[in-house]
Image (cartoon, rainbow, N blue to C red):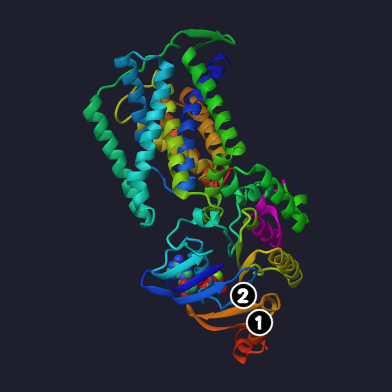
Amino acid sequence: MDLFLQQIINGLTTGSIYCLVALGLTLVYGVMHLPNFAHGSLYMMGAFITLTLIKSSGLNYWLAMLASAVALAAIGIAAERLVFHPLRNAPHANNLIAAVGLLLFLEGLAHVIWGPEFWQLPTPYDRVVQFLGLTITQQRLFIVAATLVLLAGLYLFLKKTLVGASIEAMSQDRKGASLVGIKVSRVSMLTFAIATGLAAVAASLAGPINLVYPSMGHIVILKAFVIIVLGGMGSLPGAVLGGYILGLAESMGATYISMAYKDLIAFAILVLILSLRPTGLLSGGVK
Amino acid sequence: MLRMIDVSVNYGHFRALKKISLEVNEGEMVALLGANGAGKSTIFQTISGLIKPAGGAIEFMGKRIDGLPPDQIVRLGVSQCPEGRHLFPQMSVYKNLILGAYVRSADRKGTAETLQEIYKLFPILEEKKNDPAGSLSGGQQQMLAIGRALMSRPRLLLLDEPSLGLSPLVTKEVFRVVKEINRAGTMVLLAEQNANVALRLVGRGYVIENGEIVLEDSSRGLLSNAQVKKAYIGA
Ligand SMILES: Nc1ncnc2c1ncn2[C@@H]1O[C@H](COP(=O)(O)OP(=O)(O)OP(=O)(O)O)[C@@H](O)[C@H]1O
Ligand SMILES: [Mg+2]
């Protein structure tokens, strides 16, 4: 029973990280119809920037994470302006190629700046706590709590503010949004900023329990794509649901089936769900 | 007033509009008649700034608007209710209407007033204000699309085939309200294939074929025109 509970906590931790990454990916997809393959590299950049700020400027973990989120939001806006905006009327394939190009560029950049080594992100929450008779690191609890706060914040922003509504409007009907006077480029930039900012936070949260290295985004982005296909492309609740389903399934699978097959589980679930519901669990625009 | 002067539009190599000139004067309601593919929606999209013309000029209230981005054209008082409605299907009726007032969101009091006016014009929208737009019937969606377009308080309303897919009864109801909106001082440019209904509503109209204006006359003149009768009224 304890083992089971322990795995639930682990699953919720990984699920939280997946959630934050997948939310950004699905937001960008919903608004710009762009499957942003570079999202994983932006996630990686977020981890390295937090790491650098802590190691070299001695910034505390919180401030470093915040600064990294802001930096990544700026990088996201720059990527939208410099890479994707000029291609807005180009054939779809050009966007895909550009995304892959951006991925390669960012990874190369990380190699040049930080080298190929593996780093551990220091955290002030490195002690273990006893919780319901379980031994858990504080960081894991922090990840889950921080994610819940961010989810609530994002929900309120999208549902209760006009700026949030303009993002939803754009993802539900682009032409309708333009005709009421919503500026397409402003919403695109904002969406990118939110997505990359969330990725930076996710990476900074995960950094202390996983490692930080230039290709750390690969497996995360693959999983995030599985999640948004699973949840329904462009659906935010779908991304949250899919993120936690995958996180839990992986930790259960690793314990009760085999550690070696952990990463395979994501794809097994994908095949299973898509054969039952080809449009994903909660398909549709941003809800 | 709106004035299009020799406006041409290309889709790639295909010339969809050839030197279109038309105008809508203060207080007028004008029809734009044409068959499928004639170019009506292209004209509307060009006025709204979604498509840039290849040549010619568009003026609104004496100011050049061709080349301006869509949001500025809405701000200047030109609002479009597009063909196919383009509502935000998963948002409530209320939120669709509020987004219609996006360009004047700072004016909360004015927006609330306009909202009440729209509810008065289309009481069903108030009844269904919390329902997702996508759950409404076709007629109700059309009313919502018109309501949303009116939320910016336009001086000119571009209405693209509002009767499409609606029963004659609902069409009549929608047009009754459009007439009311026009009487209250809003200019209306109405695109229709259904000339019979449209011409009973407007003062004058243009007939467009293959991207060109081929006829311009008062509605009485058009209604008795043999060519129009044959092509658009089916009499
Ligand atoms: N995005 C586009 N790309 C290429 N050609 C287009 C595009 N949109 C419209 N066309 C073409 O331009 C012409 C005019 O189309 P438009 O939609 O303006 O006609 P319409 O009068 O609104 O027709 P309908 O009554 O069917 O709505 C048609 O021949 C159409 O095929
Ligand atoms: Mg049309």
Neighbours of disc 2 within 10 Å: few (<14), some (14-19), many (20+): many
What secondary structure is found at the residue carrying circle 1?
helix
Q: Position of residue B55 (x, y in %)?
A: 39, 71
Neighbours of disc 1 within 10 Å: few (<14), some (14-19), many (20+): many
Who's the residue at 59% across and 47% down the image? B104
Q: Are marks 1 and 2 in contact (CB under 8 Å)?
A: yes
The residues colored magenta run: B130-148
For disc 2, does the CB lie below 8 Å from ligand 1?
no
Label 1 or label 2, whichever comes before in sequence order? 2
Who's the residue at 72% across and 55% down the image? B118
Can I make out residue A148 in this image?
A: yes
**Residue type pointed to by label 2:** Ala
Q: Nearer the viewer, residue A232 or A164?
A: A164
Who's the residue at 68% across and 43% down the image? B109
Q: Position of residue A195 (x, y in %)?
A: 45, 36
Tell me how far mark 1 sits from mark 2, CA to CA: 9 Å
In-image side of B224 versus B67 (left or right): right
Q: Position of residue A44 (x, y in %)?
A: 35, 30
**Image quadrant where one finds the N terminus of chain A:** top right
Q: Identify whether B39 is placed above or below A264.
A: below
Q: Identify whether B56 is placed above or below A135.
A: below
Q: Are marks 1 and 2 on the same chain?
A: yes
**Residue matched to label 2:** B31
Q: Nearer the viewer, residue A208 or A149?
A: A149
Q: Position of residue A63 (x, y in %)?
A: 42, 18
In-image side of A68 versus B4 (left or right): left
What secondary structure is found at the residue carrying circle 2?
strand
**Residue matched to label 1:** B219
Q: Is residue A168 magenta?
A: no
User: What subunit carries mark 1?
Assistant: B
**Residue type pointed to by label 1:** Ser
Q: Identify whether B122 is placed above or below A269.
A: below
